[in-house]
Amino acid sequence: MHKTTLRLHNFYLPGRPESGLLARFGAQVGLLSDRLQVEIVDGNGLGLDDTTGLSWLSQGEPDLAVLWPVFLQRNNAELEASYPMGSARHLMDHHRAVPDLEVIGRRVLEEHGIVLLAFLPSPVLWISIFSSGKPVTSLDDLRGRRLRVFSKDLEPTFRRLGVDANFIPQGELYSALEAGRFDCTVYPACHTSWSVPLWRVTQHAAYLFPEALHPYALSCSPQAWARLDDGQRCALREAAEGLYPEFLRLSIDNAAELAARRNLEAASLAWHPDFSAPDRAAFAESAAQTWADLSEKAGGRAPDNFQRLMAAMHRRPER
């Protein structure tokens, strides 16, 4: 019996829990169809540029891929304006926004001929202000400091609040803090264990906002889809949709964040109380204004996307 093999591009490294779930997806496809198997290539072993995923997957290379609008937005104005940093004030905002985020993502995929198998929740991260010298636990404390941000859209959000914020890539962060070019940065505690050892160059941290992002799109190229029969297609969709509960659990599980904070405190970093509710509200209002400005600049469907997502969150649009 002839068996069709599909290759799946996964940008996550083999040790990541997401990679483990995708391995489970591949195994489940094999159980659901004895004429189909999935070869998963972790850690971007295929050498693909995730920012151009709409292009290469629509052209049929590889067969399957995990596409993430966080990467795709660099080459798509609608996605770039659809959900900037700080859009969600809290987890409930994000859950209310997800159905409309899926509408936006599905429409973009369809326009490129890409077949969506399933949307999968991406992680919600808890973003704090790490600071050297004096602690920063309020927006007032942040004014007059030199803040590094990890996303260009955070620059106007913080500057509107009177904060000197500038983007630099993660690869430059440690040396910039060590040299004193910056004395504060936005960052999640849970990433410090494997990326940037902030406990060596900062002494204080306090939580400010959630980083909630577009869901992943587990997708199939149109060329591969055309080669499959109805039974094989059903196997792919069923196995993909079966991943949702575990990806959802991963997305909202803050155990890694809390453990990282305890480890940072053990390394002598002082963890302070969260920014106040008024400060977090002021940040969210500024982020919403940035969102409105980006949507207006992008044009097309972006302003309507903004209105719909704000309404879904039960919020009053800035414009």
Image (cartoon, grey):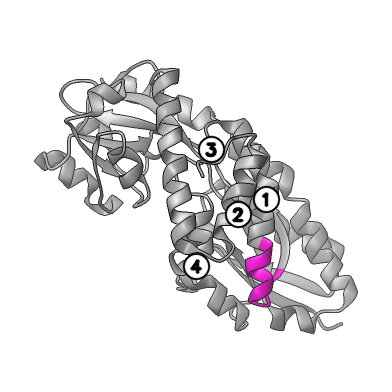
Q: Closer to us: mark 2 or mark 1?
A: 2
Q: Earlier in the sequence, mark 1 or mark 3?
A: 3
Q: Residue furthest right?
A: 231
Q: Earlier in the sequence, mark 2 or mark 3?
A: 3
Q: Is residue 231 above or below residue 161?
A: below
User: Do the residues under discs 2 and 1 have CB atoms within 8 angstroms?
Assistant: yes
Return the x and y of residue 124 as percentages of the image width and height: 54, 39
Return the x and y of residue 48 as percentages of the image width and height: 47, 73
Q: Earlier in the sequence, mark 2 or mark 4?
A: 4
Principal secondary structure, stretch drawn in magenta: helix
Residue 15 shown left or right of residue 163 in the figure: right
Residue 240 shown left or right of residue 268 in the figure: right
Q: Is residue 133 above or below residue 33?
A: above
Q: Residue at x 78, y 58 (%)?
A: 239
Q: Is residue 165 above or below residue 202?
A: below
Asked if the stretch drawn in magenta spans residue 31, the answer is no
Report how far apart the C-alphas of labels 2 and 1 lie in the structure: 8 Å
Q: Earlier in the sequence, mark 3 or mark 4?
A: 4
Report how far apart the C-alphas of labels 2 and 4 lie in the structure: 14 Å
Q: Which residue is mark 4?
A: 76
- Magenta residue span: 106-115
